[in-house]
Image (cartoon, coloured by chain):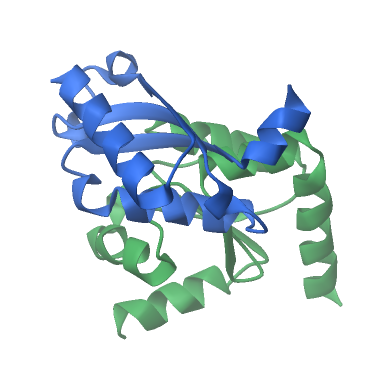
Chain colours: A green, B blue
Amino acid sequence: MDVMDRIKQQVESAPVVIYMKGSPQFPMCGFSSRAAQALQACGIEFGYVNVLEDPEIFENLPRYANWPTFPQVYVNGELIGGCDITIELFESGELKTMLEEAIKASSN
Amino acid sequence: MTQARIELIKTRLNEVLQATQVEVIDDSHLHEGHASAGGAGHFRVTVVSDQFQDKKMLERHRLVYQALDDIMNTEIHALSIKAYTDAELASAS
């Protein structure tokens, strides 16, 4: 499968998906760690892709998303941002609402 | 090297985004020994530009990344961004 198709399938595989360095349990980068912690603090289930274990994704996700860095957080298949934006949304309380709505919509 | 990188980032943001204020802080020391950085730096930037007007945060960050496109990954490993318009900065302070 073409890598762009593979990414599209991944970002749409769950209502909330994070591409990060390492895993939520063992993050390998401070930015990835903070973004994953914000998702965890919202108390919802989310999928993750460890880009360090998948060089093809690591190389091509920036092009797919027009976003050059990791982590990247996707809600309903759309990029919401990297670490800074995820944390800002978390601190304003918007993130929790946004994620809960995405999960509710997907379970209907 | 740090100072040269800071100046390069400032110049780009001023020129490309017509920024009215740019602050660049080098946080590279936080990532010493971080192998995947390959010698590139870790910076925190605050940019004030009216080009951010009516743009969502995602779009603002994209504009900053695009302004630095050719030095992302070579000079810059990680970038933390705060992006405001003049009006937002005035109302926040």
Compared with A6, B38 (above or below) is: above
* Displayed quadrant of residue B83: top right
**Where's the C terminus of chain B, which quadrant?**
top right
Q: Is residue B11 left or right of residue A99?
A: left
Note whether A41 is above or below B73 in the view shown.
above
At a point 84% along the width and 62% down the height, the residue shown is A101
- The x, y position of residue B79, in whole percent, is 38, 36
Task: Judge by depth and name the residue closer to the eye, B69 or A13.
Answer: B69
Q: Quadrant of residue B38?
A: top left
Q: Residue furthest top?
A: B29
Query: Looking at the image, which residue is at 54% across and 58% down?
Result: B59
Residue A92: percent from left, percent from top: 79, 37
Viewer-closest of A95 and B59: B59
Placement of A48 over or under B34, stated as above or below:
below
Q: Is residue B23 visible?
A: yes
Residue B19 picture location, percent across and down? 45, 41
- Residue A7, above or below B28: below
Does residue B73 appear to the left or right of B14 in the view shown? left
Front position in the image: A45 or A99: A99
Residue sitting at x 31%, y 28%: B42
Query: In screen coordinates, is A88 left or right of A29?
Result: right
Q: Residue at x 58, y 72 (%)?
A: A13
